[in-house]
Image (spheres, rainbow, N blue to C red):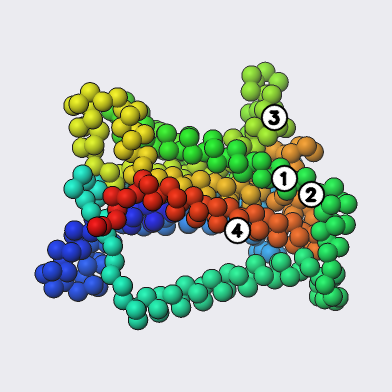
Amino acid sequence: MILIAALAMADGRLYEVAASLGTSPLRRFFTITLPGAKYGLISAALVVFTYTVNDFGVPKVIGGNFNVLAIDVYKLVIGQQDFNRGAVVGVLLLIPALAAFAIDYIIRGKLQAQLCARAVAFAPKKRPLYDGLMLLYCALVCLCLLAVLGMAVYTSFIKLWPYDLSPSLRHYYFGLLEGGILPSYFNSVRLALWVVVCGIALVFGGAYLSEKTRGMNGLRPVIRLLAVLPMGVPGLVLGLGYILFFNHPANPLNFMYHGMGILVASTVIHYYTSSHLTAVTALKAIDDEFEAVSASLKVPFYKTFFRVTVPVCLPAILDVGRYLFLNAMTTISAVVFLYSPDTTLASVAILNLEEAGEIGPAAAMATLIVLTSISACLLYALLTRMLLSRTQAWRRRA
């Protein structure tokens, strides 16, 4: 998403001028595309690295005896009730976030706007042979991903893997419906919808205030540090922090504990950094002259925000919404300590079923999540096509 937001703002005139001068496509890539996407590349690398270090779900299910720090936190807190040592490991996992902020702060000072009022969107020319090879490469990658998902779907429609491969719907009916686990799926859908609404407003609004407003220059580095910090906080540590904070009786926000509100808050904060970096990348690509001209004409900032900034950044906003929805449907580490009997989520149900050896019902619940995510992506594609045809007409050439 960060790279898409960075590449979508490329000025097509630079490519046209370079091509008219006889510059090779490879040189244009290294002299125009890569420098323009430099901030997005570094941000994406930091996000991938930090999320990999802090991952919990995949090592928990298929990691076997291969321990990672996030699993150690889970074992220390849940298995041994050793909150002190768990907190120490959590502090160690904050180091990548501090390193990410330092790198982000350094490159931010060197970044220049790529999109000005005279920019023209880049429209690559058709190259049948090259486009066909790239399509084949993407198809192979998609095939590998679909094979992994296909095994889970296949397992949900057979009686007992790998001993009885006859088709059956018993895992959906007896495992989910009769087992009383299906409400967990609807809780996840509700959570995802709330996370999208609250997350977009908080993420894009916060990014706009930190990047496009004036004043409080000394406070901006602190705000940026807080925005990057969730990327380095493991979901388990985040969940423990929410327990200790919201569970105190004297806390006026104690009413959120054991409700959907605390799940929404923790999920938005857990995935805030990547969404924030996507929004910042899109906003940094817009020249500050838009706000300067609006201020000189005495146009209120909110009119500029809704009439200029939001339409230009709409692709990034939609990407943030899709990202938050998909992650809210599958999140587990941040909410594994926060759910109540009335707010059990589908991902938590899968973890409990897997620990109990109920592989079939766990695969069935996973299949429901996958189908919901696919439906969300199709709806996203439809809304994107409809909305962008109205708000992004300036990107198309006559």
**In the image, residue 33 above or below residue 299:** below
Left or right: residue 53 compared with residue 102: right
| Disc 4/disc 3 C-alpha distance (Å) | 31 Å
Dot 2 or dot 3, earlier in sequence = 2
Front tag of 4 and 3 = 4
Q: Nearer the viewer, residue 223 or 278?
A: 278
Question: Which residue is found at the position 82% from the left and 72% from the top?
Answer: 167
| Disc 2/disc 3 C-alpha distance (Å) | 23 Å
Is residue 274 in sight in this rendering?
A: no
| Disc 1/disc 4 C-alpha distance (Å) | 16 Å
Front tag of 2 and 3 = 2
Element assignment for label 2:
helix
Question: Which residue is found at the position 20% from the left and 37% from the top?
Answer: 289
Q: Quadrant of residue 161?
A: bottom right
Q: Amino acid at mark 3?
A: Tyr
Check whether the beta carbons of the residues at disc 4 and disc 3 lie within 8 A of each other. no
Numbered badge on residue 186: 1
Check whether the beta carbons of the residues at disc 1 and disc 2 lie within 8 A of each other. yes
Residue under numbered circle 3: 257
Dot 4 or dot 2, earlier in sequence = 2
* Place of residue 271 in the rendered image (x, y in percent of width and height, measured from the top left): 53, 45
Element assignment for label 1:
helix
Q: Residues within 10 Å of mark 3 (few under 14, many from 20)?
A: some
